[in-house]
Amino acid sequence: MIVIIISMVFLEQSARYIFDKHSLAQLKNVCVILPNRRAVYYFKRYLARVSKVPFLAPQVFAIDDFVIKMSGFNQIDAVGLLFELYETFRKYDPKVDFDRFISWAPTLLRDFDTIDQYLIGDPKALFDYISEAKTIDRWNVELGKLAKPNIESTPSTDRYFKLFENIYNVYKDLHDDLRIKGYAYRGMAYRLLAEEVDSLLLDKKIFEKFYFVGFNAFSKSEEKVIEKLVKANLAEMLWDSDEYFMDPKFNHKGGKLLRSYKASGKFGAWNWQANNLLTDDKKIRIIGVENATLQTKVAGAIYAEVVAQNPDVPTAIVLCDENLLYPLMYSLDSVVSDFNITMGLSLRGSMLFTLIDAIFELQQNVAEFKSKTGETIRVQKFSHRHIFKVLNHPFCRKYEQMNYINQEESGKINIFRETLRKIVQGNIVYLSEEEMLAFGNDDKLFRILFSRWGDNSLKVLQAFYDLIDELRSIYRESKDAIETEYLYLFLTILNRLEKILFNNRQLNLKSFKHFLYELIKQEKIPFSGEPIANLQIMGMLETRCLDFERVIFLSVNEGILPSTRHLNSLIPFDASIEFNLPVQSDQNAVMSYHFFRLLQRAKEIDVLYVIPTGEGVGGGATEKSRFILQIENELANENKKIEISYPKIQYAKSADRQSVGKIEIQKTPDILNNISMLISDGGIYPTYLNEYLHCTMKFYFNKIAKISKREEVDENFGADIFGTWLHNTLEKIDYDHGPKITKELIDSIITEIPKRLETAYLEQFGGYVIDSGMNYLLKQVAEQLLEDFFKQQRESQVFPYQVLETEKKIEVAFDVNILGKVQKVKIAGRVDRIEKEGNTIKVIDYKTGRVAKKELEKSREQILEEALVDPDKEKLRQLWLYQYLMLKSITQDKSFLLGGESPENHEVKAKIYSFRNMKENLEVNLSFNDNPSIFGFIEKSEQILADLIKEMLSPETPFIQTNNMTICERCDFKGICGR
């Protein structure tokens, strides 16, 4: 505890100074004002330790609390203020659109707040300055003698300027209405106190003395209040300033206002000015890290070292980017059991908020369809993506586990998994309220989630109240204290919103969501940890007035510290300059003070930033902050006792892709048995061989281990679904119009294509939406492809020809002797079409993609046997197997497609119809040079197949990954392989 007292020098010094200036009896009549509530807490602790006997403490306030209390008004909350502003606006513009109003009203209120804090004497002059006429006048003056353009208004400029027509009246009436009701917003309270400081503070003499401690920048209203109190000898300032800020030769931006305050003398004697930054010993480490989240791991490791060396060193981890709070909490070493978070956890960062947000997405989704007349119809339907997101949310999964998974033994159907399974099976893209409630089988949570809200905000409220009731049991089960706090916080927000709605008006869904999210944005769970723990996790503004021996900064990048986020305002930059309102450079100066003030009394400082090549939380990282450059190039040059180092981050070696090498799977007896059963019972298809030759590991995962990829709903036809759609359509056409095809028949078929595609779609792909979007375009493509196909058939075919079979499954078998055992080998394939043209039988495979002739030819260096096992010759290999299957079948059974005719009298060819290049003849009649006969072809083919089967069943040949990384790019198992 003694170490903590020593480290927080400024507040301890301030407490001792104030205590020594007054007797114990006088202290109760003293008022101390500090920048924030955190400083208030520490100041009180130090003050309590100054005296050995009890005493009545002075009143200690954060500045905002002081102003509100002294003004005599209650502070109105943000949402209530928005409604007050809307009602005031309606006096001057009864037709003001509420949904549009809420898009700019929060910004306007922030501007009102700034206008009041900076005591704009004539707000009407400011609003007039922004008006259309005055703006155009200024533009013309600035143009001078140049040719003046013909300035024409646009809808956006009209809306902008129209906003300011009655803005002063709205501003004035809002003030009057709030005063009557006893309320004030923050800036209004500052103005009221500044304008009535005599009556509210000086005349009443509530306190004998005021102390303003640790401030560095005042608004005009604060200046006026303090200046009057100082002039009346009622107030004294205690500054936390340093020679580095105050010496004009450095022109330090953080000390700009401090220097002006000291020079003016209007705030009395200058207490105090130290010289820590230019004289003290300091060790500063500047550390570049690859990405934002990784900084938290580094910070955790740094603090673990600190604890190992001296567990009592007061340390602050300062998050310049507050999004890093969650990652940091999980990055602290397990030995760190005692720490305090001053920032509070935002409800927006909770798991509960992700559920609320997902439910709004679900309810607000609108599906668009095209009617037969071409009209766009908008229908409220749930999207499968939002349904999956909600039902797979951790809270819904916990509800599912409690109510269904734990009761599966009793035969209770798990409606959650069953619903998702049916959606995937049916590939249902959009679902109605009735369909989802039917899936839910009267489950409470399903009724809450999938009952339509419409535009009724009271229904939304009731739905969330019901949701909280259901979640309570989950929270009780999980015993998560933080999430329980979030749930209670959300309930209080709903209660506040309900009161506002009943006192004002009914909101539509969009407006309700806006206000709910506005309230959620404001709310944080304050941590109730040990407030004086040695480790404090803070945002930059929470560090005001506090000092630490060790400081670790995170995200000290340009754009984050200082922030480049422009002040959100309707007041243009030139108007802010004209009326002395704060601009971005003023905010940067304030942040500069806070950063360097933290360095004043710190002994060891770690400054972490994201190197520009890394990825930040919100995208690419920017350069390191100008504050780092200032330390390196100015402060370190002035203070030679500052030791700067640039340690490199070393990562523990892990089993990454390079160190592990290739994965191999040895063939155990069980695996060999499974391969044998696949070959003899299931059969080897052309796609199986292609997969095996491309990557034996993929073949293992898919066919032996039977690891299936996760089934998902596809909103757009993928290449496989699109191909299946065309195949099914062609199969139905061939079935209905075969076996003999004539030119006249083809003309008739072409007229049927749109209807045929529609029928095939409804039979198998009804879950897809084809009336809009990409699928609508693919439907047009499908119609054109089929039309082109039949036109090409009409021009190139010899008529009449026969379609003997469509979608014909062919199976043949032979035996192979492997290690003294007979292995039955089944070869199978599903042929898209079998044509007969005279004595020629053609085995056809349809391809919706482009196939080049060279893909069906062996290279000059290859003999056919080599080409057939070349991984890159998959199309040739497929046609070879189709030809083999047909020849083997007709030699074994003369009745197979030949009606008893001799197979020697027929020629068998294999052919691809490519819908992308139909005019190219993709037909082959394969034969082997050493034995070109039918039986020689069969024998040689079986020899090649037997060699592949022996390799598959060889215990010495493991399954390995391919060397062709291109194959891995679209592989479903690349995650398992780590590729």
Image (cartoon, rainbow, N blue to C red):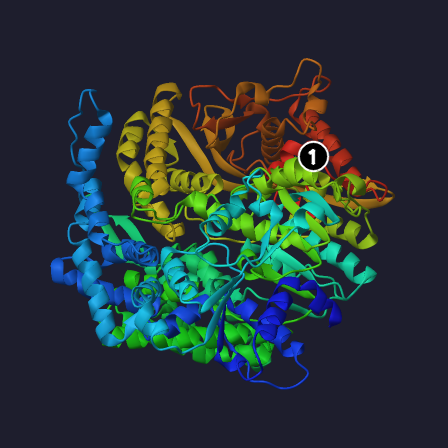
Res. 811 image quadrant: top right
Query: How far from the left and from the top, in percent, is residue 291?
Result: 63, 45
Q: Is residue 24 visible?
A: yes
Position of 96 with respect to 632 (left or right) is left
Pick the front one: 163 or 168: 168
Nearer to us in this view, 190 or 110:
190
* Label 1: which secondary element: helix
Please state which amino acid type lies under the numbered disc 1.
Leu
Q: Is residue 829 above or below residue 70?
A: above
User: Is residue 443 visible in the rendered structure shown here?
Assistant: no
Above or below: residue 226 compared with residue 408: above
Tell me which corner region of the image, top left, top right, bottom left or bottom right, holds residue 270: bottom right
Q: Nearer the viewer, residue 105 or 769?
A: 105
Does residue 842 sit above or below 174 in this rendering?
Answer: above
Q: Residue at x 48, y 80 (%)?
A: 29
- Residue 142: horizontal and vertical position, in percent? 24, 28
The picture places residue 366, in percent across and down from the top left corner, at: 31, 55
Q: Residue at x 63, y 71 (%)?
A: 16
Query: In this figure, what is the number of numbered marks?
Result: 1
Q: Which residue is mark 1?
A: 693
Q: Rate crowding at label 1 as few (under 14), some (14 to 19) or many (20 or more) other CA atoms within 10 Å.
A: many
Instruction: Return the residue found at the far top.
Output: 860
Where the C terminus falls, by quadrant?
A: top right
The residue nearer to you, when weighing 774 against 166, is 166
Q: Residue 327: horizontal and vertical position, in percent? A: 62, 57
Residue lying furthest bottom in this view?
54
Q: Quadrant of the N terminus?
A: bottom right
